[in-house]
Image (cartoon, helix red, strand yellow):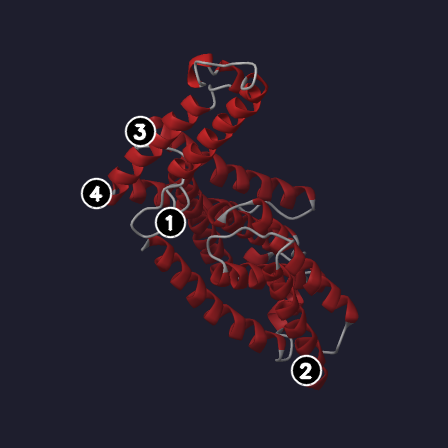
């Protein structure tokens, strides 16, 4: 059920995002975008990175990219065909034109998204895309967004950092057995959001942008407010069951890593080893060790009632 909800949410986001991207690319450039003075190529990379990530997550919600399979190449082809059509149609829009450099930037964004999902599973990949979006919009706009769009800038920092914090907590829940709201959970929940805020604002200052206290305050309120709300929310029965499963799997993995092939005793082999069976002792022992590892891996990847392995929901 968790996988189905996640896939439905991704498809809904894609259905909203793709038409919005198309419409925004086929109207005259708004004056506020011109005044923001952001690199056009950086915006193309970012927009197509988000599009490709949503498309892949909607089609393959549980799979990482395997470049030896057809799926990533098909996804890349779909995005490339759309980018070609998008650039061609911009010839008929006032103030826009067809640009090969924009097409290259679109392709770079699509490949970057597929590389991210080839390294990370869904939640860390979504975390990476969100962090890239926040960093790019906060650092690569040359104009001061707080002066240009004060309300929009505050809402963006509040919502974006809150959304990033939610994703980070989802990563902690899916990868580690952390019971909230203990001190370890609170500490780990603050590391990534505050780290992103620090790196983003430090980079903005280095690039010559002014120090914006309201943006930092809005981001801090989003981070701390999200953590406080989640910490105050009672744990559900499903979460308790998930925590117990993750803890048992962690213990099983720590025990399985301590097993070594050469630790097998000769008692696991036939007791009457004659001159005929002696040459087969080592291959047989290795075979038993490999099959035991395979079965332990299968046990660790037992799916839940929703069909999703524990720790991957």
Where residue 155 sits, quadrant-wise, is bottom left
Relative image position of residue 281 (x, y in whole percent): 54, 19
Q: CA distance from mark 2 to mark 3?
A: 55 Å
Q: Residue at x 64, y 79 (%)?
A: 28
Quick check: marks 2 and 3 in contact, CB under 8 Å?
no
Q: CA distance from mark 1 to mark 2?
A: 42 Å
Where residue 181 sits, quadrant-wise, is top left
Residue 89 is marked as 2
Quick check: marks 4 and 2 in contact, CB under 8 Å?
no
Residue for badge 4: 237
Relative image position of residue 54 (x, y in whole percent): 52, 61
Q: Residues within 10 Å of mark 3 (few under 14, many from 20)?
A: few
Relative image position of residue 237 (x, y in whole percent): 21, 43
Q: In the rendered image of this protein, does residue 172 appear above or below residue 35?
A: above
Q: Residues within 10 Å of mark 4 (few under 14, many from 20)?
A: few
Q: CA distance from mark 4 to mark 1?
A: 18 Å
Closer mark to the observer between disc 3 and disc 4: 4
Q: CA distance from mark 3 to mark 1?
A: 27 Å
Q: Look at the numbered disc 2 and give the secondary structure of its residue.
A: helix
Residue for badge 1: 308
| Whether residue 131 is visible | yes
Q: CA distance from mark 3 to mark 4?
A: 18 Å
Q: Residue at x 68, y 42 (%)?
A: 206
């Amino acid at each position: 059920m968790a996988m189905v909800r996640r896939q439905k949410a991704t498809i809904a986001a894609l259905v909203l995002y793709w038409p919005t991207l198309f419409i925004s690319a086929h109207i005259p450039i708004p004056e506020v975008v011109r005044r923001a003075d952001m690199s056009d190529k950086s915006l193309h990379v970012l927009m197509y990175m988000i599009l490709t990530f949503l498309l892949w997550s909607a089609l393959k919600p549980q799979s990482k990219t395997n470049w030896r399979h057809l799926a990533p190449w098909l996804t890349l082809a779909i995005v490339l065909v759309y980018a070609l059509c998008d650039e061609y149609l911009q010839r008929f829009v006032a103030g826009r034109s067809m640009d090969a450099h924009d097409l290259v930037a679109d392709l770079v964004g699509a490949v970057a998204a597929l590389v991210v999902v080839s390294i990370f599973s869904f939640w860390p990949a979504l975390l990476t895309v969100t962090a890239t979006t926040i960093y790019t919009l906060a650092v690569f706009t040359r104009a001061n967004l707080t002066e240009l769009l004060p309300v929009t800038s505050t809402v963006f920092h509040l919502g974006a950092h809150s959304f990033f914090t939610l994703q980070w907590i989802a990563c902690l829940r899916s990868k580690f057995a952390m019971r909230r709201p203990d001190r370890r959970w609170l500490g780990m929940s603050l590391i990534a959001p505050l780290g992103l805020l620090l790196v983003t604002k430090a980079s903005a200052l280095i690039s010559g942008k002014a120090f914006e206290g309201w943006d930092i305050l809005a981001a801090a309120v989003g981070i701390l407010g999200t953590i406080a709300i989640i910490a105050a929310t009672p744990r559900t029965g499903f979460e308790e069951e998930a925590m117990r499963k993750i803890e048992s799997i962690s213990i099983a993995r720590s025990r399985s890593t301590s097993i070594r092939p050469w630790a097998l005793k000769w008692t696991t082999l036939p007791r009457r080893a004659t001159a005929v069976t002696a040459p087969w002792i080592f291959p047989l022992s290795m075979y038993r060790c490999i099959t035991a590892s395979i079965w332990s891996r299968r046990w660790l990847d037992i799916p839940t009632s929703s069909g999703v392995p524990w720790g991957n929901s």
